[in-house]
């Protein structure tokens, strides 16, 4: 087996620029935005996480756009959400 | 079910999965047992990121008033009719109830939403905000 000079280590792969995986933790009462349409609510709609349930499902209240009260409440998989300011 | 009702997801009693007694124009089933999570008041309903600004503008109330606001809602809800229902499939039903609340010398309509998970669960307050 080929040996390396003392103090050297095998080359490692550099960062894969442009292939960045991000892990986003959604927590209760976070402000969030829909990544995709859910029921009749379009992508880009914003609101807050009211509850987090088992299996990564969030109960969300949409506040923008303005909707009827019962239409505001959605159950959404967290993968369909991203944090918003 | 009539097409209009299906389109609006307004389901008469027979179609409400798991919560057969939930009907529009009738009080919430088990309204006397309605529950609320205190963290929802501080984290959302009265919080700046949620409806805090609306509560402050309409009633002049804040975090310190969470208990008495819930008490007012809890007392009013058994006599208030459901005004809208949405079926959220496996997650149960969401119902809207509008209440007329008086806090100190101010009064306004408060829109409340309730989650009914199934027949065995009491209604749970999801959100509440005043309408000026």
Image (tube, coloured by chain):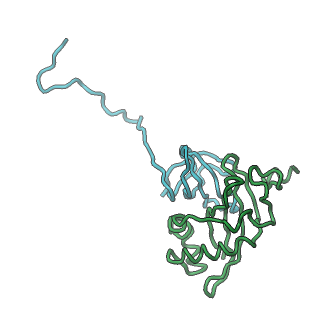
Chain colours: A cyan, B green
Q: Quadrant of residue A22?
A: top left
Q: Is residue B94 above or below residue A79?
A: below
Image point 64% across, 77% down: which residue?
Answer: B72
Place of residue B36 in the rendered image (x, y in percent of width and height, measured from the top left): 59, 65
Place of residue B109 in the rendered image (x, y in percent of width and height, measured from the top left): 69, 75
Place of residue A11 in the rendered image (x, y in percent of width and height, measured from the top left): 24, 25
Image point 55% across, 79% down: which residue?
Answer: B61
Q: Specify whether B5 is left or right of A43.
A: right
Place of residue B58 in the rendered image (x, y in percent of width and height, measured from the top left): 61, 79
Q: Is residue B46 above or below residue A62?
A: below
Going by the picture, which residue comes out furthest to the left?
A6
Q: Specify whether B76 is left or right of A7.
A: right
Q: Specify whether B79 is left or right of A20.
A: right
Q: Quadrant of residue B119?
A: bottom right
Going by the picture, which residue comes out furthest to the bottom?
B105
Task: Locate the C terminus of chain B by quadrant.
Answer: bottom right
Image point 76% across, 65% down: which residue?
Answer: B82
Counting every numbered tag in the picture gives 0
Going by the picture, which residue comes out furthest to the top?
A1
């Amino acid at each position: 087996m080929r040996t390396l000079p003392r103090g050297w280590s095998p080359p490692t792969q550099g960062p894969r620029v442009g292939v960045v995986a991000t892990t986003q933790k959604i927590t209760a009462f976070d402000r969030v935005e829909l990544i995709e349409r859910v029921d009749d609510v379009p992508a880009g709609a914003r609101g807050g996480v009211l509850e987090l349930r088992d299996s990564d499902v969030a109960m969300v209240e949409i506040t923008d756009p303005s909707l009827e009260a019962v239409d505001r409440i959605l159950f959404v998989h967290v993968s369909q959400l991203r944090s918003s300011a | 079910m009539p097409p209009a009702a299906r389109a609006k997801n307004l389901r008469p009693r027979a179609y409400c999965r798991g919560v057969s007694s939930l009907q529009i124009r009738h009080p919430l089933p088990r309204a006397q047992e309605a529950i609320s999570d205190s963290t929802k008041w501080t984290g959302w309903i009265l919080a700046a990121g949620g409806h805090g600004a609306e509560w402050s503008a309409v009633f002049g109330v804040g975090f310190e008033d969470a208990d008495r606001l819930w008490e007012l809602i809890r007392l009013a809800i058994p006599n208030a009719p459901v005004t809208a229902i949405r079926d959220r499939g496996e997650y149960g039903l969401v119902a809207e109830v509008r209440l007329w609340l008086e806090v100190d010398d101010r009064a306004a309509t408060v829109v409340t939403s309730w989650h009914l998970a199934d027949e065995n669960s009491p209604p749970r307050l999801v959100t509440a905000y005043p309408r000026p």
